[in-house]
Image (spheres, rainbow, N blue to C red):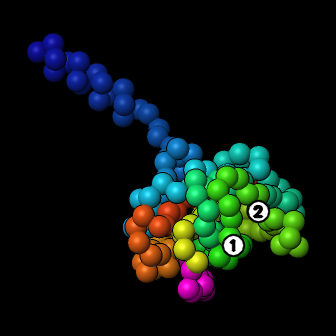
Amino acid sequence: MRTFFLFGALALGLSACTVTVRPDANASVQLQGQRSNLISGLRPDRGEGSTYGVGEAVRFQFSARTPGYVTLIALQSNGFASVLAQNVYVNAGTTFFPRPEDGVMYNLAEPRGIQRVRAIFTRVRPTTAIVLSGTYDGNRWNSATTAYLDPYAVGDRDVQETYLYIR
């Protein structure tokens, strides 16, 4: 009887709680291509989950355990996706994007809300380019990444995602 009241009180207490779910900085995106642990970090220059204003510039810190090729893709809050960097060779260690030799800046624009950025890494030079068109929900976003990585051995590919907010 005492156990019954304990579980009842616990259930009543938990029913009054509000749970908010957001991407976790320590959780990797679980995709077919993400198994090899080649990427050791990806984050915006102010840290994951940080807030930027429209028009502000952002840089991304990407770290890899081995040399290879990275592609950065972004998904806006309205579902529009774009390629930020395509098949860029990086050494093991940390690289900041955009790099000075890229001759571009990543200035944030509308829509306001969460912006997801995904790093796709392969040890071997990709033979194709990722093509993004239209709008994406979570399933289509993951499908595009998985289709791009399918030709590469599991040990030669990795994926990691980060996010920021645009206000």
Q: Amino acid at mark 2?
A: Phe
Q: Which residues are magenta?
A: 126-139
Q: Amino acid at mark 1?
A: Val
Dividing the image into 4 quarters, which one contains the N terminus?
top left
In this rendering, which labeled residue sits more in front, label 2 or label 1? Answer: 1
Q: How many marks?
A: 2
SS class of the residue under badge 1? strand
Q: Residue at x 47, y 71 (%)?
A: 142
Q: In the rendered image, which residue does mark 2 sit on?
A: 97
Location of residue 79 by image quarter: bottom right
| Res 49 visible | no
Give residue 13's position: percent from left, percent from top: 36, 26
Which of the two labelled residues, at mark 2 and mark 1, occupies the earlier sequence position?
A: 1
Give residue 135's position: percent from left, percent from top: 58, 80
* Magenta span contains residue 52: no
Separation of disc 2 and disc 1 at Cα? 10 Å
Dividing the image into 4 quarters, which one contains the C terminus?
bottom right
Give residue 152's position: percent from left, percent from top: 44, 75
Answer above or below: position of 128 versus 140. Answer: below
* Residue 142 appears left or right of 1: right
Q: Residue at x 32, y 28 (%)?
A: 12
Q: In the rendered image, which residue does mark 1 sit on?
A: 88
Location of residue 8 by image quarter: top left
* Residues at marks 2 and 1 touching, judged by CB atoms closer than 8 Å: yes
* Residue 51 appears left or right of 115: right
